[in-house]
Image (cartoon, rainbow, N blue to C red):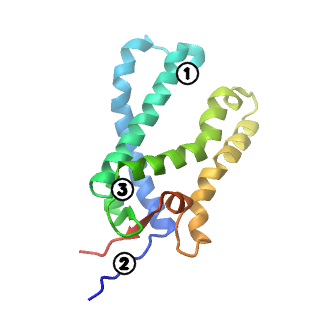
């Protein structure tokens, strides 16, 4: 008796899970901000207001997000949003991913997001013309978005994250 592999999740189901997870991450980041509040003295967490503390805070936020995804992916293969949308992240052979796989996926996402993560705070976030800022933001996020939308042209319906990290996101059956 052969076990059939579950179908790979499409773009819309993945986006649904991502929207749910974004809401959870916003709440988690609010809590993760608490240790920084006594250091701000009413200032905004941007470099021109608080100097290097803003960069420490941004790195802290990225670390919290990485730990959030890594923990859930390695524990059950599912974040809160993935449970709601019945999708699971797994290795291509169907086994649970480990921390090395999770770090690889997170690293890929960070590399693809690097133009935005570095460009906005250092360069075009200071530009006066909001249209130029919007254009620069869209261009800088293009690699991240295109790696995700790769699912539509990939023969196995894998995103570039999946392809490069040797993982896949599958749809789970209804219980």
Residue 46, which numbered label?
1
Where 115 falls versus 161 (above or below)? above
Q: What's the residue at 33%, 57% (across, down)?
A: 78
Where 98 falls versus 168 (above or below)? above
Q: What's the residue at 48%, 29% (across, down)?
A: 59
Q: Earlier in the sequence, mark 3 or mark 1?
A: 1
Where 23 falls versus 62 (above or below)? below
Which residue is disc 2 drawn over?
A: 5
Residue 97 percent coordinates (x, y): 35, 57
Residue 142 percent coordinates (x, y): 66, 51
Dot in front, 1 or 2: 2
Secondary element under disc 2, as helix, strand or loop, is loop
Which residue is disc 3 drawn over?
A: 81
Dot in front, 2 or 3: 2
Where 137 falls versus 40 (above or below)? below
Q: Quick check: can you spot residue 122?
A: yes
Quadrant housing the C terminus: bottom left
């Amino acid at each position: 008796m052969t076990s059939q592999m579950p179908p790979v999740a499409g773009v819309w189901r993945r986006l649904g899970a991502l929207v749910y997870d974004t809401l959870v991450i916003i709440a988690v980041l609010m809590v993760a901000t608490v240790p920084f509040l006594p250091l701000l003295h009413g200032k905004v967490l941007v470099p021109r207001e608080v100097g290097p503390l803003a960069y420490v805070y941004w790195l802290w936020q990225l670390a919290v997000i990485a730990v959030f995804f890594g923990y859930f992916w390695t524990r059950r293969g599912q974040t809160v949003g993935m449970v709601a949308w019945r999708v699971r992240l797994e290795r291509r052979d169907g086994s649970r991913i480990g921390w090395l796989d999770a770090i690889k996926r997170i690293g890929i996402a960070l590399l693809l997001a690097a133009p935005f993560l570095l460009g906005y705070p250092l360069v075009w976030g200071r530009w006066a013309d909001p249209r130029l800022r919007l254009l620069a933001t869209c261009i800088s996020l293009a690699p991240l978005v295109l790696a995700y939308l790769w699912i539509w042209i990939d023969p196995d319906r894998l995103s570039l994250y999946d392809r490069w990290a040797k993982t896949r996101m599958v749809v789970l059956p209804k219980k």
